[in-house]
Image (cartoon, coloured by chain):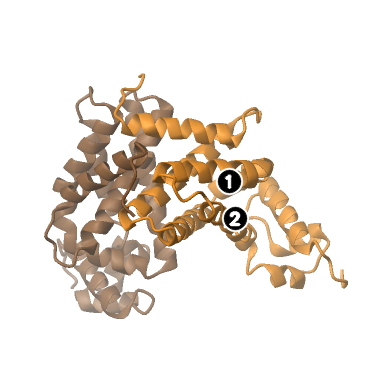
Chain colours: A brown, B orange
Amino acid sequence: MGRWDPDARGRLERAALELFAEQGFADTTVPQITERAGLTTRTFFRYFADKREVLFSGEEELRERFIEIIRTAPADLTPVQLIRHGLEAAAETIFQPLLEYLRTWRAIVGSDGALRERALRKQELTIEAVLTVLRERGTDEPAAEMIAKLSNLVLQTAVGRWVAQPVAERPLVAFVEEVFEQLRSTVAGEPVHR
Amino acid sequence: MGRWDPDARGRLERAALELFAEQGFADTTVPQITERAGLTTRTFFRYFADKREVLFSGEEELRERFIEIIRTAPADLTPVQLIRHGLEAAAETIFQPLLEYLRTWRAIVGSDGALRERALRKQELTIEAVLTVLRERGTDEPAAEMIAKLSNLVLQTAVGRWVAQPVAERPLVAFVEEVFEQLRSTVAGEPVHR
């Protein structure tokens, strides 16, 4: 345990997620996490400020990758094409491989009010980051705000439905497309079946 | 102070909001609030669990009023007509008279990460309440989710622009209509000016 471990962070994350899922977030302590990971408490605090941060530390990297997709998208896309391009690419390259992780993560976060609040705040940071890159691309301000917020709405809705599938039959990108179609028909004012 | 005060709650809310705005949320204590309101700390805790709750206790009533508007809306509206009807009525009857309050409230909440998280969670509760009433009206599930989320997006965007006006020239309902138009043109894929 004294030697440098190239995957200490990953081991701590996996141990924490297992314990949160097994016995609940509130009832899990940092010593329990480090014991399961076979690491010291001191190592834990080298990577995370507290047990809550284990659930959110990876988000910044995901956000950066998502922003990069939007930054490098073709310049001639209309706003809705840009969101669609960005979300479909993100679904395939970023989120699809994380299905099991995200399913567990959402169940843990959904079970605790304070974690839920933190997750919503992280969504807002993503909206702000998208807004920044849209401004850099020259999109005007009110349009950029609308695109950034809609992209969050579509992504969150699609991911929610994707992880709720009892068997993971359909890929996330299919849900993204479905939510886009639903957004389009709702906003166009088409009547829905009751 | 010993006698029953019919507006104790309102006095505490006003005193708290003034102090939060003047000296910051973090630096304001419950005794300072009660001193300014001319009431006792004991009275404060009869109404609020802590100083944070002063900023959120009124939201439940606003949410109930908003839900009632949707509950009693004509049955033959399409989803987008229903959101529009609900938000325009809410803008005029619920929010318009609260301009100064909401302006101060948003500045205070925006200045503190934990308050921001709590405010986002309250938005989510509103989305869930709208979802429930839509189900009662017989709207099918995926459509109801989309409508509830879009109504939150439109309302938050419109309120943000409304309170940001340096002089309150235009009513909230005008911003609601403008945001709806922007939503429509964005989703329809119309190019925007750069």
The residue singled out by tag 1 in the image is: B90
Closest to the observer: A56 or A82?
A82
Q: SS at mark 2?
A: helix
Q: SS at mark 1?
A: helix
Residue at left offset 17%, top offset 57%: A98
Residue at left offset 57%, top offset 36%: B173
Report the disc number at residue A65: none
Residue at left offset 26%, top offset 52%: A158
Viewer can see residue B104:
no
Q: Residues within 10 Å of mark 2 (few under 14, many from 20)?
A: some
The quarter of the rendered structure image containing the C terminus of chain A is bottom left
| Left or right of B10, for residue A136 | left
Closest to the observer: B187 or A97?
B187
Residue A157 x, y percent position in the rendering: 30, 52
| Left or right of A78, for residue B96 | right
Q: Residue furthest top?
A: B193
Residue B44 x, y percent position in the rendering: 73, 67
Closest to the observer: A14 or A111?
A111
Report the disc number at residue B65: 2
Q: Residue furthest front?
A: B76
Q: Residues within 10 Å of mark 1 (few under 14, many from 20)?
A: many
The quarter of the rendered structure image containing the N terminus of chain A is bottom left
Residue A132 x, y percent position in the rendering: 36, 33
What residue type is disc 1 on? Answer: Ala
Viewer can see residue A57:
yes
Residue B31 x, y percent position in the rendering: 74, 64
Q: Is residue A4 above or below residue A91?
A: below
What residue type is disc 2 on? Answer: Arg
The subunit letter for the residue under badge 1 reads: B
Closest to the observer: B22 or B145?
B145
Q: CB of mark 1 within 8 Å of CB of mark 2?
A: yes
